[in-house]
Image (cartoon, rainbow, N blue to C red):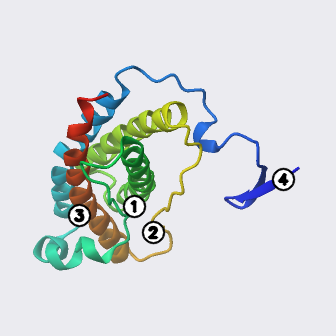
Amino acid sequence: MHCRLVAGKALPVDSPSPLCEKKYTCSNKVFEQIRKQVILLNGTAQELFNIYVKWQGDTFRNHTDKLCNPDTIFFPAFHVNQTSEKKEIVVALYKIFAFLNASLGNITRDQEELNPKVTELLERLNNTTKTTRGLMVNLSCLLCTRYNVSQVDVIYGESTKGKNLFKKKQQGCQVLAKYVQVISKAAQVLLPHINDV
């Protein structure tokens, strides 16, 4: 039996990838659903960022550009464009949304600790997480059924566990600032690919 190392445990080479363990049945309009989910996320990203900053305190409100600089945080590269193959776009989208989903988990956990009564922020984080998870299901469906991609190398962001409060706030702020940039590009890249599905 041949094995490979995946997330610290050996799996048989012929075992199904965790990405394709579910049996997916994609809707005929799955690409349209993906486009709508990305447009929804793009339409709410800046507001989520603004509300996040609002609740991190005066230091963040007064020094947003410096403290929330999106160029100082790791975020998966999104190097596809409007002329890229659809499969390449779907893989790139999966990578950024897998990263974002994990990051949103960290940010939400931290904000539940730091701002447990701020429903304005927590509801937006939860809604973004739900939409992101739905988007990942649709992306997984396309990858597994239409493109026969059973594994995507995903990189997750740094955990905030054990960091001081300021670093937790800053990392969340940087990730959300970068998310605003990347989701805007993703929305632009997807548009021309919808009409020929």
Question: Is residue 119 visible to the viewer in this orientation of the structure?
Answer: yes
Residue 15 rendering spot, x and y as whole percentages = 75, 41
Residues under labels 3 and 2: Cα distance? 17 Å
First reached walking from the N terminus: tag 2 or tag 4: 4
Q: Name the residue under label 2.
A: 160
Tell me which numbered mark, 3 or 2, is placed earlier along the sequence: 2
Amino acid carrying label 4: it is His
Determine crowd level at label 2: few under 14, some 14-19, many 20+ residues with C-alpha closer than 10 A: some
- Residue 33: give its label: none
What is the crowding at mark 3: few (fewer than 14 residues within 10 Å), some, or many (at least 20)?
A: many
Above or below, 9 relative to 62:
above
Looking at the picture, tell me which residue is in the foreground, 66 or 61. Answer: 66
Residue 57 sits above or below residue 81 on the image: below
Q: Residue at x 27, y 29 (%)?
A: 196
The answer to which of marks 1 and 3 sits earlier in the sequence is: 1
Q: Name the residue under label 4.
A: 2
Alpha carbons under labels 4 and 3: distance apart = 43 Å
Query: Within the image, what quadrant is residue 131 found in?
Result: top left
Separation of disc 2 and disc 4 at Cα? 36 Å
